[in-house]
């Protein structure tokens, strides 16, 4: 008797969205298949960033802070191979909230490439132009939940 690979039960997300991460990715009726080891994440997002298509978000409600990880191995699982690309605080309206999105709510993620100047000892006002990616996480109503500056070096494969 051959055992086929289980079908995923997680809904697919549209590009530019984020939602709560359920952690359940395989159907429960297959007892032979052991899912890969995963870390705990609160939210997942789907957005094309460099060479990758999404990632995971850890939220610390006590400190009102977010950590954003890119799915660097493109496995669809939050594991040790995923890299931290940015962290920051949630906006004032969402501080102290236990959940940033309701269970079935789908939020919006936007990315914008921002250039800024790095001054070096007053030699030139814009000695070395630098680029960073700014991620904006909004709820379904369009209210800004968090704004994270992502390190552009981690968005591309090694």
Image (tube, helix red, strand yellow):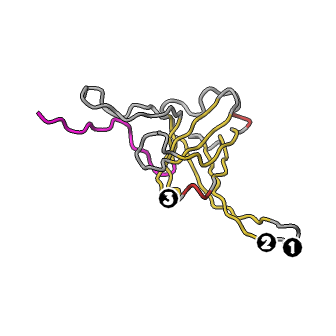
Drawn side of residue 93 relative to residue 39, left or right: right
Marks 3 and 1: CB-CB under 8 Å? no
Pick whichever, 129 or 138, lies toward us.
129
- Numbered tag placed on residue 154 in the rendering: none
Q: Position of residue 134 (x, y in %)?
A: 65, 54
Residue 69 to residue 103: above or below: below
**Which image quarter holds the N terminus?**
top left
Labels 2 and 1 touching (C-beta < 8 A): yes
The residue tagged 3 is 157
Q: Is residue 129 above or below residue 106?
A: below
Residue tagged by mark 2? 127
- In the image, the segment drawn in magenta is 1-16
Question: Does the magenta run of residues contain 2?
Answer: yes
Element carrying mark 1: loop
Residue at left 87%, top 67%?
121
**In the current view of this chain or complex, which residue is farthest to the right?**
122
Q: Mark 1 points at which residue?
A: 123
- How packed mark 1 is, by other alpha carbons closer than 10 Å (few <14, some 14-19, many 20 or more), is few
The percent position of residue 9, horizontal first and vertical second, equals 34, 35
Q: How many marks?
A: 3
* CA distance for labels 2 and 1: 7 Å
Label 3 environment density (alpha carbons within 10 Å; few <14, some 14–19, many ≥20): few
Residue 63, magenta (yes or no): no
Q: Is mark 2 on a helix, strand or loop?
A: loop
């Amino acid at each position: 008797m051959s055992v086929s690979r289980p079908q995923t039960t997680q809904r697919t997300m549209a590009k530019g969205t984020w939602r709560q991460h359920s952690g359940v990715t395989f159907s429960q009726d297959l007892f032979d298949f052991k899912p890969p080891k995963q870390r705990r994440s609160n939210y997942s997002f789907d957005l094309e960033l460099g060479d990758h298509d999404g990632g995971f978000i850890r939220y610390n409600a006590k400190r009102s802070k977010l950590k954003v990880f890119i799915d660097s191995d493109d496995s669809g699982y939050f594991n040790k191979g995923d890299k931290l690309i940015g962290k920051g605080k949630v906006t004032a309206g969402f501080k102290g909230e236990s959940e940033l999105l309701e269970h079935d709510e789908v939020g919006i993620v936007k990315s914008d490439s921002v250039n800024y100047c790095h001054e070096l000892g007053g030699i030139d006002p814009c000695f070395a132009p630098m680029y960073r990616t700014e991620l904006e996480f909004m709820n379904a109503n369009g209210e800004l939940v968090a704004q994270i500056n992502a390190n552009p070096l981690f968005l591309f494969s090694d």
